[in-house]
Amino acid sequence: MWTPPDKIRHAIPPARWPSAEEAAASRWFSPIDVGPCRLHARTWVPAMVPWRASDDGLVTPDVIAWYARFAAGEPGALVVEATGIRDVPSGPLLRIGGDRFVPGLAALVEAVRAASGGRTRLFIQLIDFLAVKRRPPPDKFFARFLRVDAGHRRRLAAARGDDRWLDAPEPELRAHLMSAEPGLLKQVLTDRERRELDYGYRELVTDLDLPHVRDLPRVLPELFAAAAARAEAAGFDGVELHYAHAYTMASFLSRTNTRGDGYGETLAGRARLPLEVLAAVRARVGAGTAVGCRMLGDEVIAGGSDLADATHFARAFAGAGMDFVSVSKGGKFDDAQQPKVGEAVYPYTGPSGYECMPTIHSDARGPFARNVPLAAAIRAAIRADGRTTPVVAAGGIHSFDQAEAILAAGHADIVAAARQSLADPDWFLKIRLGRGAEVRRCKFTNYCEALDTQHKQVTCQLWDRVELDEPDLARSHDGRRRLVAPRWRR
């Protein structure tokens, strides 16, 4: 992952832990209504992809164990990982694109209910994504993937000062480009073609020449609505529409969306499909099911959306009946690091990815609560409209006092923690019981994210190699790591 060039290694701040009485009287452990759902506390575990589903996208015993372990800490809300709304191959990622997925998801819901004693509300994040291909070897790109046209011939002839390339046999032209120096390729290939050579093919929401991309506004509302109905049938308390990071819906919201069909270019055009998806989902599910979203406060890419765009969209979402808005930052393909040949580009490896999950190797601002100002500005804009839609803040959350200060300042209504919850799934319960000194504190080195980037089962370095002699212990594919944190023996 990218890190700031003038990085500083930040120490984990010391923490003061409250007594059980102080925790009980705190804002963080007070209830809040999220649409039709009452959370017993304003503690929240955001969606994290653990790479534990089957290759067919089905719930496995390891998926159930992962979420049951978080539920044992009794967070106010737990959000299940990004779950595909289409039944298309996507590796060991959960899917909800057909009724065959409902029984497994229902078993997951039941396990979370049991592990939390019914205290944790369970949401599922619904995602759509476009095709991303692996970076090809240059010989394969030039032999198979490059679509040679008259433009290539004209540019090559001009670059070489040789008109024979205007009608040279195509195999000869391909072979010439395959052995060409980078400077020539820059003159002959389009920007898009050079990126596909260097990073792999990736569909964009602006590819209106592709019928299935052109038809996204027609098909996505129904796909999201059907997925939400399946989530409701499985027993989830709500759904979180994934409008963040590098995926389809965030790409519609982005300033980089130049579609000229009414679903891009302007703020209204870019928000149109997300609002239509929200309306379709809301019409399909019952009044007892919460519908919220995860969105970006800032894309952190050249030419991308910023906080002004985000506040506009959040106000529109709240006005259209969104039950909560969870704020993130960055995580885009646009500035991702170049993958190795044979691997796919990953959106959390560049500067915008760093801003999504900052580490202790940071700039002077440091990684802790780094993105809270985005949530604060969005919440203020929603409140200025007279609406009380809860806003969830996240990013480098690590202690009770930190979370309590965010709530006391009115920067958010709910404070979420992903990496700290992974380090210690019981930490919310430990704090509530006055036993915060026993919290296993995250180091914020992104060991977990490094595993995610490699599409390996995600674990935490603080516990994945301890108590490996535990009977019937579920281990990683290589047998070296345990897959869930040890049980808290209280």
Image (spheres, grey):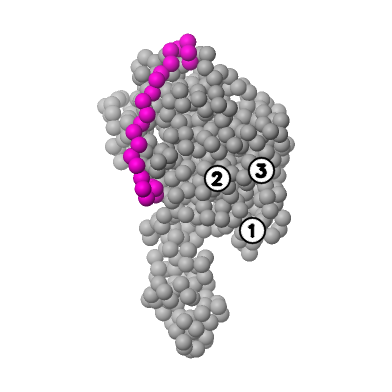
Instruction: From the image, give the main secondary structure of the stretch colored magenta.
Output: loop
Residue at image point 66% right, 58% down: 259
User: For this rendering, which residue is in front, 236 or 339?
Assistant: 339
* Crowd class of label 2 (few under 14; some 14 to 19; many from 20; radius 10 Å): many
Q: Where are the magenta residues, as a range? A: 1-23
Mark yes or no: residue 1 visible: no
In the depicted structure, whether residue 474 falls above or below residue 185: above
Q: Mark 3 points at which residue?
A: 312
Q: Give the image location of residue 214, x and y in percent.
A: 66, 58
Name the residue: 56% across, 30% down. 411
Q: What residue type is labelled 3?
A: His
Question: Magenta stretch: residue 3 in it?
Answer: yes
Q: Nearer the viewer, mark 1 or mark 2?
A: 2
Disc with the residue nearer the chain's start (2 vs 3)? 2
Please name the amino acid that badge 2 sits on: Asp
Q: Which of 419 and 380 is in front in this view?
A: 380
Q: State which mark lies toward you, 1 or 3.
A: 3
Verify CB contact (< 8 Å) between mark 1 and mark 3.
Answer: no
Q: Does the magenta stretch include residue 289?
A: no
The residue shown at (35%, 19%) is: 438
Q: How far apart are marks 1 and 3 (CA)?
A: 18 Å
Can you tell which mark lies on residue 258?
1
Q: Crowdedness of circle 3 by 10 Å Cα count: few (<14), some, many (20+)? A: some
